[in-house]
Image (cartoon, helix red, strand yellow):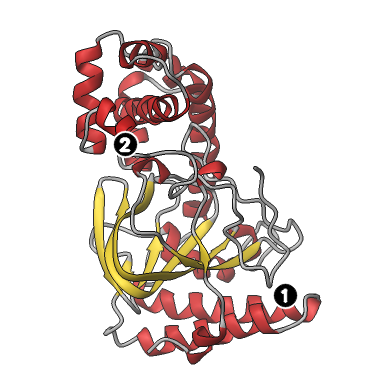
Amino acid sequence: MLPAILDGLRFEPWRVGHLIDRSRRYQLDLNPDFPFAVQMLTYEDTFEPTTLHWHERLEIFVPTQGSGEFRIGTNSVLFSAGDLLVVDNLKIHGLTKFVGERRAIVITFLADLVYHFGSPSCDFLYLTPFYCQNGRTSPLIPATHRLAHSLHTSIGKLLHCYFMSSEGRQFQVGCKTYLLDLLYTLTQHFGWSDVTRSVYLHQKQQADRLGAVYNYVKVNYSRKIPVGTVAELVKMHDSRFMKYFKKATGMTFIQYLTHVRLVNACRLLRESALSVASIADRVGFSDQSYFDKKFREHFDQTPSEFRATGWQTGRTGLSAASPYPKARTMVQHHS
C-alpha cells in the first residue's frame, strides 16, 4: 500500500516537451552538489508520441493511481497503481497509455550520487537494478510482490524527507539514506550475481559513444546519413555499430533516424504553414509517399490529420509550465 503522505502532497502537470531536444534527450539539470529529484506528476488525457525520450539520469517510475503502458525501447510494460518500474534510461522510453486518475511519482538521480570511482566497490551493488537488467528479469515489480511493502515504506520515508524537511546537509543525508534503502530492497529482486564494476564502466562508455551519435543526428537529420558516417564517430565497423546501437537503444539506427525526422516533421506541421511535401523534404524524406507511410506507422494518422486535430503548442508535452513541485527549488530547467 502506498504511503499516506501522498494525500498531503501536490501533484504537478507533466509537461516537458520543451525540455526534450531533437535527439530525444530529456535534459533536466540537477543540483551538481546533490543530483537527485522527486517529481509528483499528473498526466493529461492525451499523450503526444513525440515525448518519448532518453536521458543519462537513472529513473524509477511509481504510478500512484491509474494504469497503463510504458514503452522501453521496443518493449512495452503494463503497469497498475502501486507497481514500481525501473527504467532503462538510455533506451527511448516513455508512457504510451495511461488511464484512470493518472498520477505517478518519478524518482531520478545521477549514478555518481550512489557510486563513483572513489566509492567502496560494494556501493556499485546499489545500481544493480539499472545496469544488470536482462530479458529474464522484468523491470517492473507489481504492487502484489512480496517486496512491495518494503519498497512503499522506503518511498514514504523518502517523500517525507524530500518534501517536509528543510534543505541542507541533513536534508541531503536523509534523502540519500532512504534512496539507498529503496535501492537495497530493489537489489533483492534483481539479484546480486555477476555484478562487477566493469558493467558500470561499460555503461558509462556506452553513454559517451551514443552521445556523439545523438549530437550528430541532431544537427544533420535532414541530410542523407550513411551508417558508415556515424559508425566512424564511435570507431566501429558498420555491422558492429548497428548491433551495438540496437542493443543499447532498443531500436536500429535507421529506426532512430526516422523517429528524429518524424518528430521534427511534427514540429513543422504545428508551427509552420509549409506544405506536407515541403516538410517531408525539409526533414530528410525525398519521397512524400514514403514520408506519409512512415508518419502513419509512427503516429497512427496522416500528416494532414495530425495538423488538423489540434496538436498545438500548449498541449501535453509542449507547455513551458514548470513540471516540478514548488516545494523544491533545487531543480533547474531550460526553456
Q: Judge from the rendering whether residue 87 lies leftward or rightward of residue 100; answer left or right.
A: right
Quadrant in which the C terminus is drawn? top right
Q: Amino acid at mark 2?
A: Lys
* Up-down relation of residue 21 to residue 161 (above or below): above
Question: Going by the picture, which residue comes out furthest to the right?
Answer: 168
Q: Which residue is mark 2?
A: 246
Q: Judge from the rendering whether residue 108 lies leftward or rightward of residue 103; answer left or right.
A: right
- Residue 160: give x, y in percent of width and height: 61, 85
Could you tell me how far apart the alpha carbons at marks 2 and 1 are, in whole angstroms? 37 Å
User: What SS does tag 2 mark?
Assistant: helix
Mark 2 packing: few (<14 Cα in 10 Å), some, or many (20+)? Answer: some
Depth check, mark 2 against mark 1: the one in front is: 1
- Residue 251: give x, y in percent of width and height: 30, 37
Quadrant assignment, res 175: bottom right
* Up-down relation of residue 198 to residue 223 (above or below): below
Identified at 49% across, 74% down, the residue is 183
Q: Which residue is mark 1?
A: 172
- Residue 76: give x, y in percent of width and height: 24, 55
Q: Nearer the viewer, residue 162 or 75?
A: 162
Q: Nearer the viewer, residue 21 or 245?
A: 21
Q: Nearer the viewer, residue 243 or 152?
A: 152
Dots 2 and 1: beta carbons under 8 Å?
A: no
